[in-house]
Image (cartoon, helix red, strand yellow):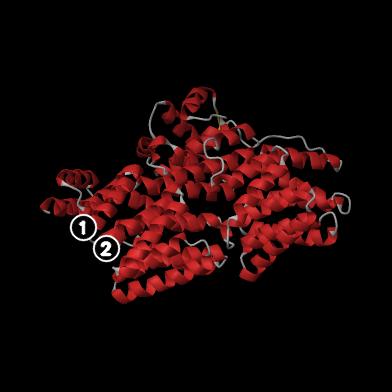
Amino acid sequence: MVEVAEGFEALGKGDWQLAHDTFTATLDEGDLPEALLGLANALYWLGDLAAMLAALERAYAAATKRGDPILAAASAMSLVGYHKQFVGNTTVARGWLARATRIVETEAPGLRGELLGATSFVTADPVEAERLAREAFEIGRSAGNSDLEVLALTSVGNALVQQGRVSEGMAALDEVMATAFGGSQGEPLTAAHAGCMTLVACSSHFDIERATEWLRAMDNFIERYGCPFLYAECRTHYGRILFENGDWSAAEESLLAALAPASGATPSSTAVASALLAELRVAQGRLEDASRSLRGYEGRDECVYAEALIYLAKNEPSVAANRLRQRLDDEAAFRLELTPLIALLVDAEVLLGDQASAVERARALSERGTARDCALIVAYGRRAYGRVLASTEPARARRELEAALRAFVQAETPYRAAQTRLQLADLLRESDPDVATAEARIALTTFEDLGAGRDADLAAGLLRSLGVKAARSGPRNIGRLTKREGEVAELVAEGLANREIAERLVLSVRTVEHHVARALVKLGARSRTELATAISGRVVQN
């Protein structure tokens, strides 16, 4: 067991490769559950998901064979979390949870707090998830188990956000992040999980300010520990926030970074990043590229929204509605993350003429947002309700769309706000053409600035129907690089990586990433190679 102790000593120092090699050498003499759990830990930080899962399965089998219920339950609960978070397979996660539950309830009652936490993590109903997590938190606090406290409070915060109680939930997650990344964190795995789940929560309600602040702390953590899984997850969810907040070039760069071969992306984060990239491509009017982004991930829960968007853009609402209904029918309880799917299904049902279902769905969503005092649910719900009422109660539809517009503006989501303005303009084109023109003009300007070509075409067409000249101009400053963007692009052309560019220009890596992303978009390049080719003919603005 001396080698096992040396392996854990290497883990404590953050020497993942030495820990891996030490535990592997120990296992030449047979499967020791301690060594296998240590090996799984090292493999996490080294970014080898398949080998990590295999090591945990071997650890469970070895602990069971030896009659060690504590290590068997610990192995099973680790498999619960990783299958849910990284593989995206809730069914397998629940299978391992059932095994862990049987062991804890009969042979390892001291792990009840950890079991409650694992159960909360895979529970679809956020109200029940909150209850379980709070009970786990109290057990951790009573036992002085700080890691259990942090993990449980992370689950509490996420459950509150998913209920629509965003302020309460984010307050809990701020406490978690201050504890986990404040310089006195305990187990690094705990901090990694807390950071990932906080970014997920920020992503669900587009909280760019909080996400940016905590991402800085996580980047420092990643710099110290490695953690490729966390890197890919952070870039994925930050990409979504950037998209919703209108920085599409930076969003694209972030998502592409998450999907890069060396990013350490897991099956779940790859599917999410691919779906978000497809959503961005639809917004840009690049439907073929959107479909290409989803290739191989069709039918996964993470991709249903993007799939439905593509079908609607292709004027196939029945297929879109079918995909969305299948996804929503599988859910026993409402969560904040389902809001866009419900609103999109309303759009599809309106196009299909299923007015009764669309009205009921939109009304329920709007009422849920009001009951929870959640601005984002209110925004989606009232916009959906406004759409279904447009043909029957135009005055009420106007009130609903105006309320939705205020909520999207308050949430600082320019694309969603511009889409709502366009719906409002379409509703008012005959009854109040002056207001319709004003709203359509603002929408067109926003779409042009973002690069939302398909929506910009619709806005320009509506303005022309109102007797207004509205030729498309394309996104502003396309093909024109700032001085700094030009400097960064030239270094890309020289073959330097982002970190090397950051060192050369005394910038942060994230700033360089943003400059590269904007240069790609402005020069119409889709890769660093194309950027290098295009840079010779660039135009730089002073």
The answer to whether one can see residue 224 in this image is no
Q: Residue at x 45, y 28 (%)?
A: 490
Q: Which residue is mark 1?
A: 66
To which quarter of the image does residue 390 belong?
bottom right
Up-down relation of residue 303 to residue 130 (above or below): above
Mark 1 residue type: Arg
Seen in the image, is 478 located left or right of residue 225? Answer: right
Seen in the image, is 318 located left or right of residue 274? Answer: right
Return the x and y of residue 97 as percentages of the image width and height: 40, 60
Q: Residue at x 50, y 43 (%)?
A: 271
Quarter holding the N terminus? bottom left
Return the x and y of residue 409 as percentages of the image width and height: 65, 57
Q: Which residue is mark 2?
A: 69
Seen in the image, is 214 located left or right of residue 148? Answer: right
How much space separates mark 2 and mark 1, taking CA atoms? Answer: 9 Å
* CB within 8 Å, label 2 to label 1: no
